[in-house]
Amino acid sequence: MSKRPVIGLTLDAEEPGGYSKLPWYALRKNYFTALAEAGALPIALPHDPDLAADYLDRLDGLLVTGGAFDVDPALYGGGPAHSTVKLKYGRTAFELAATREALRRDMPVLGICGGQQLLAVAFGGTLIQHIPDSVEGALQHEQPNPRTEPGHEVSVAPGTLLSRVVGGRGRIAVNSAHHQAVDRPGEGAVVNAVAPDGVVEGVEHPGYRFALGVQWHPEYAVDEADPLIFRAFVSACRR
C-alpha cells in the first residue's frame, strides 16, 4: 500500500459547558473514519489563522467540515444577518484562511455541508441566508429523520467532477442538515448538484486540481455513492 496522504480536518469549536468547563474543540468520529477507510491519514486542525500556511506545509489535502453555525454574511456582501444566523468568528477566520491558501497552492479541498458553503465564499460566491424565507415551496432541508437516513435526492450535473467521482450517477440519495445554501457559486465555479426544489447541493471549480463541495454529509454513507467521494478526494491528495 502506498503512503497514506495526510489530510487535515477543520474542527468545530464549542463554548464552556457539556464536555468541559473551558472552551473545547469537537468533531464527529465518522469524518475521521471515512477518510481512514479511503486510505488517508486524517489529522485535526485547531483554529489559528496565522498558522494556516504552516499546517498546509505538512498536509496533502484539506477537508472543511460542517457544523451548526453560519458564514458571516459580511464576508460575501450578504447584508444584515438573518435572525437565524449563528456565527463562530474564530472558526470561520481559520477555515477561510486555510481554504484560500489551499486553493492558492492548488491543494485538493473537499467541503462538506457548511464547508461547501465556505468553499463557495472562497470562490467569490454568495449564500442564501435562510432557505424557508428565500425558496418558495422548499423541502425540509433540516430533515426531521435521523442523519443516518436520506432526507431527499439530488440531481448530479453531467460532465462535472462530481459526476465523474460518483460514476456518472444522475441521482443520489442524501441526508440534509442545513438552513442556508449557495446562491451564486463564484466566478469560474459551477453548480454540480441540485435538490428537487432547485436548492444548490454542490459546487466545484474546474480551475483547480480538486476543489469540490457537497451540501450533504457523505461521511454517513447513506448512499453507495458517498464513499466514492472520499476515495476520489484521497486519490487526488496522493498526486
Image (spheres, grey):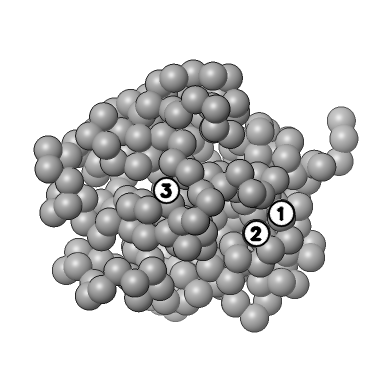
Numbered disc 3: secondary structure: loop
Q: Is residue 37 above or below residue 55?
A: above
- Residue with the mark numbered 3: 113
**Snapshot quadrant of residue 14:** bottom left
Q: Residues within 10 Å of mark 2 (few under 14, many from 20)?
A: many
Q: Amino acid at mark 1?
A: Met
Give the alpha-carbon distance from disc 3 to disc 1, as whole Å: 20 Å
Q: Amino acid at mark 2?
A: Leu
x%, y% of residue 16?
A: 38, 75
Q: Amino acid at mark 3?
A: Cys
Q: Which tag is nearer the camera, tag 3 or tag 1?
A: 1
x%, y% of residue 44?
A: 63, 59
Q: Residue, x 45% and y 29% (percent of image)?
A: 157
Q: Residues within 10 Å of mark 1 (few under 14, many from 20)?
A: many
**Quadrant of the rendering where the N terminus is positioned:** top right
Give the alpha-carbon distance from disc 2 to disc 1, as whole Å: 6 Å
Give the alpha-carbon distance from disc 2 to disc 3, as whole Å: 18 Å
**Snapshot quadrant of residue 222:** top left
x%, y% of residue 182?
A: 36, 51
**Snapshot quadrant of residue 191:** top left
Q: Residue, x 60% and y 26% (percent of image)?
A: 164
Q: Residues within 10 Å of mark 3 (few under 14, many from 20)?
A: many
> Do the numbered discs 2 and 1 sit on residues whose CB atoms are within 8 Å?
yes
Q: Residue, x 21% and y 56% (percent of image)?
A: 130
Work out whether residue 175 can be spotted. Answer: no
Q: Residue, x 53% and y 68% (percent of image)?
A: 96
Residue sitting farthest toward the right: 2
Work out whether residue 156 can be spotted. Answer: yes
What is the number of the mark on residue 107? Answer: 1
- Residue with the mark numbered 2: 103
Numbered disc 2: secondary structure: helix
Residue sitting farthest toward the front: 188
